[in-house]
Image (tube, grey):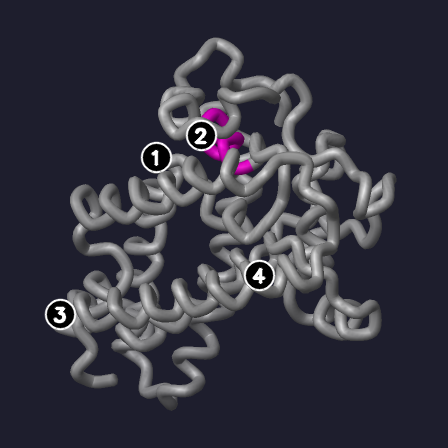
Amino acid sequence: MNALTVDSATSIRLGLFLAAFLILALAELRWPRRKLSLGRIQRWPANIGLVVCNSLVVRLLVPVAGVASALLAAQHGWGLFNLLALPWWLEILLFILVFDLTIYWQHRVFHGVPLLWRFHRIHHMDQDYDLTTGNRFHPVSIMLSALLKVGLVLVMGASATAILIAESVLNLSSMFNHSNLALPSPIEKFLRRVIVTPDMHRIHHSTDPLEHNRNFGFNFSFWDRVFRTYQHLPSQAQETMPIGLTGFTGPTTRHLTSLLIAPFSRSAGRTR
């Protein structure tokens, strides 16, 4: 991994994304948790279109994001890890934990600050819940998140390998815990002790305002327990719990152009 470059890291992440997408998409078809209210043809073009837009935004507007910022920090000796003689495995483990904690708090801030909620609510406007919901974010949200990651990498002095692993884990876990996948109850309970499962995070996408301000974690489940934002069960059954945001329904919630301009509408600040 010493020869890791931005291009090779991008190829690795793309390969992992495509493999995970295919596996989860097939698993959802075979073991669905809920009956979807809308067909994939109605939702997936906009959700996947946002993935494409976001990839272009990061590459064009935040060119030092992720691995590139790690390589820059290593070149100049910036950051905590470049000042400490830690084993490589401990450095990676510590960075993954700090990275995930940062994403947890970023998520809470995006819910709590009205201006940021305008952009983050695009994620919650999806009226169904499957693996594509895990990548349904407004480009402005992605750009702000990328800038935060750059700052974290430069302060921590994380290696390119560490940031590649952390970003890959985040992306894969986001698709997994947003998937419409029915896990056997014993396995779900076991996994939930450490990582966020679909049943745990689906509560966060409930139309109930109290519930969509719970279970903010994307990867590790213990942050919600530590900071007292954990909810074990929804008020309604997982199979019938309404998904989305009250007052945001119809075609405008599943058309790419509508989603891109939605943060700038007068109603953008409603329902946090």
User: Which residue is the site of mark 1?
Assistant: 140
Q: Of the two numbered discs 2 and 3 on the same chain, state the one appearing first in sequence.
A: 3
Q: Amino acid at mark 4?
A: Phe
Estimate how packed mark 2 is, as few (under 14), some (14 to 19) or many (20 or more) residues with alpha carbons within 10 Å: many
Residue 105 image offset from top left, x and y in percent: 53, 48
Foreground pick, 78 / 121:
121
Q: Label 4 neighbourhood size at 10 Å, few (<14), some (14-19), many (20+)?
A: many
Secondary structure category for the residue under label 2: helix
Question: For the view shown, which residue lies furthest in the bottom direction?
Answer: 87
Task: From the image, tell me which residue sits under label 3.
Answer: 76
Q: Which residue is mark 2?
A: 119
**CB of mark 1 within 8 Å of CB of mark 2?**
yes
Q: Which residues are magenta?
A: 116-123
Chain-order first, disc 2 or disc 4: 2
Amino acid type, mark 1: Val
- Labelled disc at residue 176: 4
